[in-house]
Image: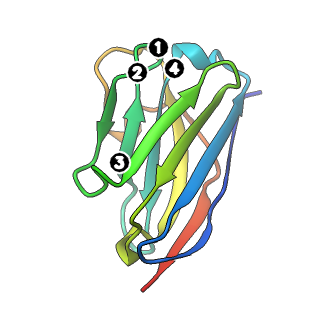
Amino acid sequence: QVQLVESGGGLAQAGGSLRLSCSTSGFTFSSYDVGWFRQAPGKEREFVTTMASRDGRTLYADSVKGRFTISRDNAKNTVYLQMDSLKPEDTAVYFCAGRFNPGTLRSNPSLYNYWGQGTQVTVSA
């Protein structure tokens, strides 16, 4: 069955870094765009970044541009999120997601087919 398992979350200080990983199985990873979303308490799930299946195109939310970097290893069926210069407002549960029919990169979470269970990131001031 399809599985997406995030890891690497935890506690960081403002200005620090964390690297999230999302290991996947059960679907053809190299044919899917993969993205990261986050959800803070009492807020809706919001787009963070996404990466195209094969050609390396990326899209970032303005709030993380220049601080976060998405990457993927199609041989390992894994997507990563390097988070630098963390801010307290980055505190949230982070989810990875996969979207078939790759084409135009999308930020709408309803367009993603598969989701992980999430990993907590907490940034202290």
In the picture, measured across the screen, residue 69 lies left or right of residue 32, that is left
Give the percent coordinates (x, y) of residue 114: 57, 33
Look at the numbered disc 4 and give the secondary structure of its residue: loop
Look at the numbered disc 3 and give the secondary structure of its residue: strand
Q: Residue at x 66, y 57 (%)?
A: 8
Question: Disc 1 versus disc 4: distance between alpha carbons?
Answer: 8 Å
- Residue under numbered circle 4: 32
- Residue under numbered circle 3: 47
Question: Disc 2 versus disc 4: distance between alpha carbons?
Answer: 12 Å
Q: Residues within 10 Å of mark 1 (few under 14, many from 20)?
A: some
Kindly identify the amino acid type of the residue bearing the numbered disc 4.
Answer: Tyr
Give the percent coordinates (x, y) of residue 41: 45, 74
In the image, residue 74 sits, relative to residue 41, either above or below, namely above
Look at the numbered disc 2 and give the secondary structure of its residue: loop
Q: Residues within 10 Å of mark 4 (few under 14, many from 20)?
A: many
In the picture, measured across the screen, residue 19 lies left or right of residue 41, that is right
In the picture, measured across the screen, residue 48 lies left or right of residue 34, that is left
- Residue under numbered circle 2: 56
Residue contact at pointers 1 and 2, CB within 8 angstroms: yes
Kindly identify the amino acid type of the residue bearing the numbered disc 3.
Answer: Phe
